[in-house]
Image: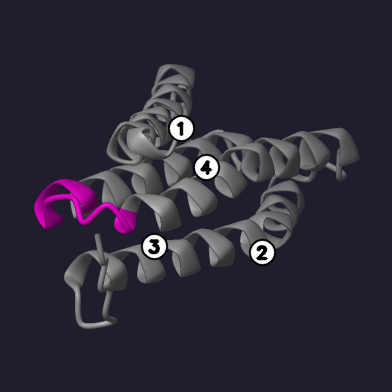
């Protein structure tokens, strides 16, 4: 079975764009937190920043790996694109909760759960697709 993946494939393009957006979000975490603390007159709490980075790294690393594997299964583009968009939106909501608390905690929790479930779904899809290799 030969899998041909080109950069013209919309799912690949979406994966690349959303991966880059998530990297920018990760890099923007410190300045976002600093601006919030300065605006509120609160001095930096390194523990909050550390927890936010760890949360992001624990969720983004598996997403990037599984997302790259997922696109090799040539899933329906509309489903794959929707999954990448929902994951990115969920992680944006989570980081807003960490950085400045403008969103209710229930939304942050929903973002955490949704991003986790999307990564799990893509993982299971990849395992099922390549099940004969086990």
| Of labels 1 and 4, the one closer to you | 1
Q: Earlier in the sequence, mark 2 or mark 3?
A: 3
The CA distance from mark 2 to mark 3 is: 14 Å
> Magenta stretch?
71-80
Q: Is residue 47 left or right of residue 37?
A: right
Crowding at mark 1 (Cα within 10 Å: few <14, some 14-19, many 20+): few
For disc 3, the marked residue is: 18
Q: Say what secondary structure mark 2 lies in.
A: helix
Q: Mark 2 against mark 4, which lies toward the viewer?
A: 2
Rendered location of residue 42, percent (x, y): 81, 41
At which x and y percent is residue 113?
43, 22
| Label 2 neighbour load within 10 Å: few <14, some 14-19, many 20+ | few
Q: Which residue is mark 4?
A: 96
Q: Magenta segment: does it hold 78?
A: yes
Looking at the rendered image, the disc whose residue lies closer to the viewer, 2 or 3, is 3
Which badge, 2 or 4, comes first in the chain's sequence?
2
The quarter of the displayed image where residue 38 is located = bottom right
Q: Which residue is mark 2?
A: 27
In this view, the residue farthest toward the top is: 106
What is the crowding at mark 4: few (fewer than 14 residues within 10 Å), some, or many (at least 20)? some
Going by the image, does 95 lie left or right of 107? right
Q: Marks 3 and 1: in contact by CB < 8 Å?
A: no
In the rendered image, residue 3, in percent from the top left (x then y), is placed at: 26, 66
| Along the viewing direction, whichever of 87 and 93 lies nearer the viewer | 87
**CA–CA distance between discs 2 and 4?**
14 Å
Above or below, comparing residue 118 to residue 56 in the picture: above
**Does label 1 or label 4 sit earlier along the sequence?**
4
| Left or right: 68, with 56 as reference point | left
Label 3's element? helix
Q: Which residue is mark 1?
A: 134
The numbered mark, 3 or 4, whose residue comes first in the sequence reads 3
Q: Quadrant of residue 131?
A: top left
């Amino acid at each position: 079975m030969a899998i041909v993946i080109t950069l013209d494939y919309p799912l690949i393009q979406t994966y690349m764009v959303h991966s880059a957006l998530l990297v920018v979000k990760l890099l923007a975490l410190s300045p976002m937190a600093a601006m919030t603390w300065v605006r509120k007159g609160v001095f930096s709490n390194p523990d909050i920043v550390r927890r936010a980075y760890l949360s992001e790294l624990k969720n983004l690393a598996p997403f990037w790996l599984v997302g790259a594997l997922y696109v090799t299964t040539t899933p329906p583009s509309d489903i794959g694109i929707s999954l990448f968009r929902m994951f990115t939106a969920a992680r944006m909501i989570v980081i807003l909760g960490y950085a400045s608390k403008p969103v209710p905690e229930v939304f942050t929790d929903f973002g955490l759960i949704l991003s986790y479930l999307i990564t799990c779904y893509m993982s299971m899809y990849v395992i099922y697709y390549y099940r004969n290799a086990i």
